[in-house]
Amino acid sequence: MRTLLAGAFLVFAAAPVAAADLPLFDAHLHYSHDAWESVPPAEAISILRKAGVRRALVSSSNDDGNQKLYAEAPDLIVPSLRPYRSRGDIGIWARDDAIIGYLEQRLARYRYAAIGEFHLYGADADLPVPRRVVQLARQHKLFLHAHSDRDAIERLFKQDPGARILWAHSGFDRPDDVRELLRKHKNLWCDLAFRTDHVSGGKATPEWRALFIEFSDRFLLGTDTYVPERWHYVSGHASLARGWLADLPPDAAQQIAWRNGDALFGGMLEPVKE
């Protein structure tokens, strides 16, 4: 699979790609129970392909949605294991010991590229359940996809300085704060899901543009289909992203559009020989 995917992406890398034609890696999608009921797997995959999404990091509550989507298109879907058996776990998972058994069972049965997206703030990152999640990520060589404040990100790195963290929504932080953390932690990447402050008039704002150029290898796009209706925003979001990426230097635009995602996640799910 890695050879085929690498070959496909080399085609795109062989020559400059117009922004309107940029393939995309979407690093923040969800396909939870209500989504697969209203947007069947085949339809969801069709939406992604029509939007020019070549690969996507997907999680779901519960994980069955993820597996349905992956079975439909293993060439496209990169599964991430969310520690939520249902959306009701969002606010309680960090204090629920049963979550660990759930994660361990899924990790023994399926293959993933990350654990998350999970919501975790401040000192809660040091609770026993999140600590065990960090250990599981290290054990299985997985990314952590953290919807967290800066404090929690720092605590996760303190637990495992070698952790690889994808910071959901770039923490909803200001560009100067994001820059500071990126300079401090070489294994921190940021997705831009559900942000609007980085774009004005169809272009990246001056502050964000400078940050995107300085750290063009550390940002990824994301749509965040946190409710089923958001699946119908995928195409429009892709068009908007290509619009502001067109204002960046071509190499930076391609890195953020798809190269970073492919470099980080593209080779993590090699087929397992039965």
Image (cartoon, grey):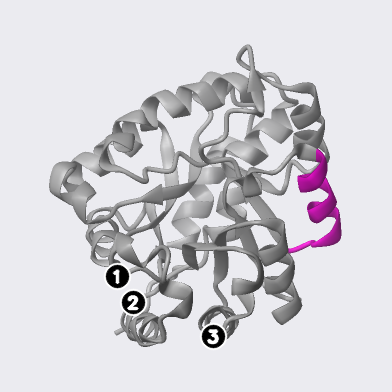
Looking at the picture, does residue 269 appear above or below residue 235? below
Residue 152 seen: yes
Query: Tag 1: residue type?
Result: Arg
- The residue lying toward the viewer, choosing from 158 and 57, is 158
Q: Where is residue 249, by image quadrant? A: top right
> Residue at left 26%, top 41%?
228
For label 1, the SS is loop
Using a 10 Å C-alpha cutoff, classify the residue at mark 1 as few (fewer than 14 neighbours), some (14 to 19) or many (20 or more): some
Q: Judge depth for marks 2 and 1 and give the one in front.
A: 1
The answer, for residue 160, to whether it is visible in the render is: no
Residue 154 horizontal/vertical position (percent): 74, 67
Q: Is residue 171 left or right of residue 51?
A: right
Residue 103 belongs to magenta span: no
Q: Position of residue 194 (x, y in %)?
A: 51, 37
Say whether disc 1 or disc 3 marks the residue closer to the N-terminus. Answer: 1
Q: Is residue 125 left or right of residue 85?
A: right
What is the chief secondary structure element of the magenta stretch? Answer: helix
Which amino acid lies under the numbered mark 2 shown in the image of this protein? Answer: Tyr
* Residue ID for mark 1: 85
Q: Secondary structure at mark 2?
A: loop
In the foreground, 86 or 1: 86
Looking at the rendered structure, the kind of residue marked 3 is Arg
Q: Which residue is mark 2?
A: 110
Q: CA distance from mark 3 to mark 2?
A: 19 Å
Closer to the chain start, of discs 3 and 2, is: 2
Residue 98 placement (x, y as % from top left) = 35, 85
Q: Which residues are magenta?
A: 176-187
Residue at 31 percent across and 43 percent down: it is 227
Q: Are marks 2 and 1 in contact (CB under 8 Å)?
A: no
Distance Cα–Cα, label 1 vs label 3: 17 Å
Instruction: Say if 129 sits above or below 265 in the image.
Output: below
Mark 3 = which residue? 132
